[in-house]
Amino acid sequence: MSNLEARPVETDVTRCDAMAEVFEPRVVPLGGLRAMSVERVMPQRGLPTVGAWCFLDSYGPADVAMRVLPHPHTGLQTVTWPLAGEIHHRDSIGSDVLVRPGQLNLMTAGRGVSHSELSVSEPLHGLQLWVALPADHATMAPAFEQHVDLPVYDGFATVLMGSVGDATSPATTHTPLVGADLAVAGTRVLPLRPDYEHAVLAVSDLTVAGTPLRKGQLLYLGTGRSRVELADGRAFLLGGEPFPEDLVMWWNFVGRSHEEIAGARAAWEAADELFGTVPGHDGARIPAPDLPGIRLTPRRRRQ
Ligand code: MN
C-alpha cells in the first residue's frame, strides 16, 4: 500500500537544493488493434520541459501490440528505449531497423520526418521520449542513429544521452542534457551537474532522494544538486540546462508559434514532400487531428 502522505509539498523555488515534487502520469490510449495505452508524465501542467526533454511516455510491461502507422514530426528528437519486446522502425529517410532492448534509437526530425513503429515481439515495455531542438537546429535535415554499445557509469547507469561522471554517450545532442537508465540494487549515488535541472522517472517502484515513488511517477528535482541517492529499483534520469525558449507543442510537432504548427499540420495533410514517404505502408498514414479552435500558445512552467 502506498503512503499518500509521502507526496512532498511544494517547496520555495528559491531553495532549489530542497526541491522535490512528484508528478503523476495520465493514461493515454494510442489506439490500434489491441488498444495499446501509454502513461504520459510529460508534458503536463507545471512541467513543460526538463532541460530540453519535452515528452515522456512509458508503456507496458503488457502483452499488447504496437501499431503506429506513418506520422510526422518536426522540431524534436525521438528517443526510443525498449526494455522488452522488439519494434520495427521505418522512416522517410530510409531507416528500416529493429529496435531492441539495450539499443538507443534516436531520430532527429529537424524540419520534417515521418516514421512508423510496429511491434514484432511482445510483451512490450519501454520508454519514448522527445528532446526539443533549439531554434538554431529546429530546421536541420532529419537524421537517424542507432547505438548498440552505450557506456555504463559505475555498473548501474547506462548513459543514453550526454554524460554521467566520466561515461559519455556517443549519441548526438544539440543542447546540454543527460538521459540515463538506472538499475539500482541496494543504495547507489549518482553524480549530477548542479547547473542542470533533473527529474527521475520510476520505471519500477523505488526510492529517490528519500522519496518513495510508485512505478510511473516522476520526481522533479530542480537545479542545484550535485548528487542524488537512489535505492532498490529501476529508474530513468533526465536532465539538462533549463531550456530557455518557449515551445509550442501540438500533436507530433514542436515549434515556436501557432503559425509554424499550423503550417506543419497543413503540409502533412497535403502529403507535402517535407515529410517524405515511409516505405511499406501503401500510403496508409495517421491523419492529423483538427487544430483546436483557439491559438496555440507556449506551455510555461508554473511559478
Ligand atoms: Mn513518432
Image: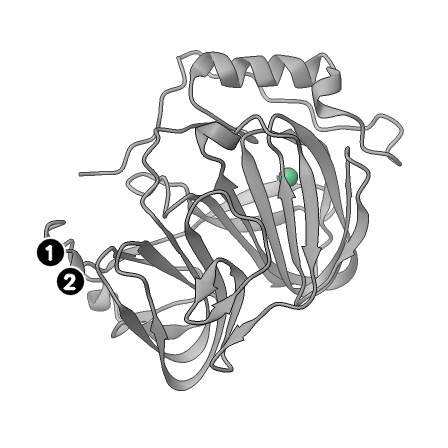
Left or right placement of residue 208 versus residue 96 in this view: left
Amino acid type, label 2: Ala
Disc 1, disc 2: CB below 8 Å?
yes
Q: Which residue is depicted at the point 70% across and 20% down? A: 274
| Percent position of residue 204, x then y | 47, 71
Left or right placement of residue 69 versus residue 163 in this view: right
Can residue 1 be seen here? The reply is no
Indicate the quadrant where residue 207 lies: bottom left
Can residue 56 be seen here? The reply is yes
- Image: 138 above or below 29: above
The numbered disc on residue 207 is none
Amino acid type, label 1: Arg
Left or right placement of residue 15 versus residue 129 in this view: left
| Percent position of residue 103, x then y | 67, 63
- Image: 46 above or below 258: below
Left or right placement of residue 244 versus residue 143 in this view: left
Residue placed most toward the observer, 124 or 64: 124
Residue named by callout 2? 18
| Percent position of residue 109, x then y | 62, 34
Residue named by callout 1? 15
Indicate the quadrant where residue 196 lies: bottom left
| Percent position of residue 30, x then y | 62, 41
Q: Which residue is depicted at the point 89% across and 36% down? A: 280
- Looking at the rendering, the quadrant in which ligand 1 lies is top right
Residue placed most toward the observer, 57 or 107: 107
Q: CA distance from mark 1 to mark 2?
A: 6 Å
Residue placed most toward the observer, 16 or 287: 16
